[in-house]
Image (tube, helix red, strand yellow):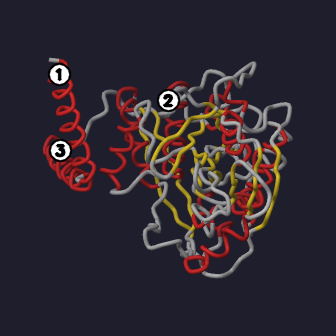
Amino acid sequence: MRSIYFLHIFLIYFCFGFFILEARELSIKQIEERKQSDLERLKEREKRGNKKFSKEITLSTKLIFLSMERKTPPVLSNLDPILDDEGFYGVKLAIEDNLTTGRFVGHDYKAEFHRILLNENLKSEFQKLLNQGNKFFIVDLNEKELKTLFETSNSEEIVIFNVRSKADSLRNENCKKNLLHIPPSYSMLSDALTQYLVKKKWNKWFLVTGPDENDRKYADALKKSAKKFNIKIKKEKVWDFSADLRRTAGKEVPIFTKGEKYDVLVVADEKGEFGEYLTYRTWDPRPIVGTQGLTPTSWHRTHEQWGATQMQNRFRRESGRWMTEVDYHAWTAVRSIGEAITRTSSNDVKDIRKYLLGEKFGLGAYKGVKVSFRSWNGQMRQPILLAAPRSMVSVSPQEGYIHPDSELDTMGKDQPESTCKF
């Protein structure tokens, strides 16, 4: 009887597992079917007319999403998509979410998307947007470009949400009162990763740094985290090879990694120029972490907890691709503005900024706990996902790391360490 019972369980599990596998294989087809369903619902809504506000519009808020055109970089392989719409769908979905409440309380939201072309001047184009009276900016710019914006205006009558740059300097010596940061800083990412490596007792590192400036900044953060958590960096090297690794990695990598005994290879390769080629090619068999392998990140396509699956599916139906970090940051920025306007019944910049940096603000962002902003530097405190390419491994802060105010502040520069002076 017991054998029959287990046979039934096995058959159910097998059939159910097969169904899941089939569903995964047909995910693109399912997406197309859902898109068709969405189109049919859209037609039905158009027949009924646009959704009406339950209350007369008392506040109308316009948001500007600002980005720069980029030169197309070389890619690791043809499997890597080159995206030119990062952030767009995040803003779009967040506007829909804001209007869910806004229609009941009379708050309207609109977004404009501005991309600065390669032959245009960022400073002059930003000044034009300021002259039009725009107050709320979600900006997809790097560290240098963000600094350029403040050469144009440092007015407290605007608020800028950074959705790309992870530079620690923007949260410290170059911080601004009206600049809020959604992405985790390099120090937050490195602390999140280091907490997990300490938990695994991988306390001896081989650190490999790429040639790019951002690689060096990430490596600097990793070194500080190593010192903070009593990690030994047994060896440190800079990757400066220019050969085509698709042909030479099998020979170059073993020689490059031979020598010191270490527990884990830590990589700082933001552009992905060489990091992927280290896997399975090191002299000693060791795990790889950092920008490749096990990666600390604010968002990942494998994230399914705390309602994230619904967000992932919704985003894929809308865009036809996976949600990236920048998409998530843009969504979070717009939702933060909407939450603040709903709570304060005001879209005055000073009121919004005061509320966002206050203790009352908290936003559900599919991370298990509400995210909020650090009052001393404008950085969003949030859990950090630790993900492999096709699986979620862990979430930091790790168990056992405590803080008098928030465990999330065990990652990155805490208030006593910060050099930010508003």
79, above or below 309, in the image = below
Q: CA distance from mark 1 to mark 2?
A: 43 Å
Q: In this rendering, which labeled residue sits more in front, label 1 or label 2?
A: 1
Q: Which residue is at a point 54% across and 46% down the rendered structure image? A: 329
Can residue 144 be spotted in the picture?
Answer: yes
Residue 81 image offset from top left, x and y in percent: 44, 67
Secondary structure beneath label 1: helix
* Residue 127 seen in the figure: no
Q: Earlier in the sequence, mark 3 or mark 1?
A: 1
Q: Secondary structure at mark 3?
A: helix
Is residue 352 found left or right of 7 in the rendered image? right
> Is the N terminus in the top left, top right, bottom left or bottom right quadrant?
top left
Mark 3 → mark 1, Cα distance in angstroms: 45 Å
Report the residue marked by disc 3: 41
In front here: 404 or 370? 404
Q: Is residue 385 left or right of residue 145?
A: left
* Residue carrying label 1: 5
Q: Position of residue 59 (x, y in %)?
A: 47, 35
Q: Which label sits in the foreground, 3 or 1?
A: 1
Return the residue at label 2: 364
- The amino acid beneath tag 1 is Tyr
Residue type pointed to by label 2: Gly
